[in-house]
Image (cartoon, rainbow, N blue to C red):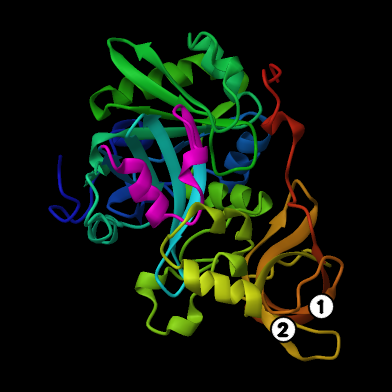
Amino acid sequence: MQNHYENAVYPSPFHSRQKQHNQLKEWSRWADYLSVPAYWCESMEYFAGRNACGVFDITPMVKHRVTGPDALPYLNRLMTRDVRKIKPGRVGYSVWCNEQGRVIDDGTIFHLAEGDYRICSQEHQIDWFMTNALGFDVTVAEDTHDVAGLALQGPTSCAVLKDMGLKGIENLTPFGLTTFDFEGTELMVSRTGFTGDLGYELWIDPEHAERLWDRLFEAGELRGIMAMGSDALELLRIEAGFILAGVDFLPAMEAVRPTHTRSPFELGLGWLVSFDKGIFNGRQALLEEKEKGSRYNLVKLDIDGNKPASQSYVYTPNKKFAGTVTSAMWSPSAKASIALASLEAPLGKPGEEFEVEIYYQRELKWSRVMAPARVVKDVFWDPPRKRQTPPADF
């Protein structure tokens, strides 16, 4: 296993294939890897994810392996949710906090087998995970570079995997995972993703990465498969109401000012806090917050007009400051300007109305508009096919 600090930046195991598709010849950095913002057209890649299927390289996602007799009690001490409910062969979403009840990061927990878990997150967490392992009979290691991953997202994703020969993939339920033999190695497939749509994530040994890419694109040739960059993925995740570390909240370990961090309740993730499972990091602070109330509410806004409200201020109808927009876009699917915003509590109840101060530039001229907005309860994109098992062959 390589250590993430040995090199400044890595090419992905899929880099040779990404390079072939990258018509714009632009590269960005995600964690320790080269990544692609857009291969040729952000809008077309977005529509592939909503109307066909898009392929996004998730190899740079930071991965930690937790194994040993105490793996479950260790994770239950570390995480806010009850990890006992994530059975072998299942995946669960969670957050973990410091002792002040502020979110350090969020991620997915893959229960690979009894006493064997993988945690996928935005940030490197090995120091925090190792510190919290004291007293537990567990082994914690970062295995980011040992696993290559692709996200296949969109309505034709299941049909593509069936055409690729993954027999029975249509029976995999949301947040389930299974394995297949793939040309002499193991291919793990989970029904997970970051788009709020039907989709899967494929995990394989890096030495077989290029072959997996080739087989996937061969199978998807007639089903609209397309390489998708991070710009398109950003649009898809906002529509789905998913939060992103460093954008919608500041990871507690990176904060200079602790008051700028957020708790799970302040991110709308109170459902991930299980007080009945025993002691966990931040439990006392979160109990006190539940009793006294939170400082902020993360809400979804439907905004009048067609101007994205990126980094905008939000005001009450009587012009008092209410909060800030954290993520925003013009949604082609919702046909609306939408946003996630952090509002000062107790503001943020569904149906509550606000004004959003939007600045935009056209032909070197800056304009300002105060756009009416309202809090909505549901996410902007939540198709039934996301949950349907087996999915239809769209």
Give the residue displayed 75% in from the left and 36% down from the top: 383
Structural distance between the alpha carbons of marks 1 and 2: 8 Å
Residue 222 part of the magenta segment: no
**Is residue 274 in view?**
no
Q: Amino acid at mark 2?
A: Ala
Horizontal arrangement in the rendering, residue 329 relative to residue 99 (left or right): right
Q: Disc 1 or 2, which lies upstream in sequence?
A: 2
Q: Are marks 1 and 2 in contact (CB under 8 Å)?
A: yes
Q: In the rendered view of the protein, which quadrant contains the N terminus?
A: top left
Q: Looking at the image, which is closer to me, 376 or 48?
A: 376
The foreground one among 8 and 110 is 110
- Front residue of this view, candidates 84 and 130: 84
Return the residue found at the far left.
6
> Is 210 positioned to the left or the right of 130 in the image?
right
85 within the magenta span: yes
x then y, percent, for residue 173: 60, 25
Q: Residue at x 28, y 22 (%)?
A: 208
The residue to which callout 1 is attached is 354
> Quarter-wise, where is residue 291 in the image?
bottom right
- Residue under the image location 77 percent in, 53 percent down: 378
Say left or right for 116 vs 274. Answer: left
Quadrant of residue 49 within the rendered picture: top right
Residue named by callout 2:
322
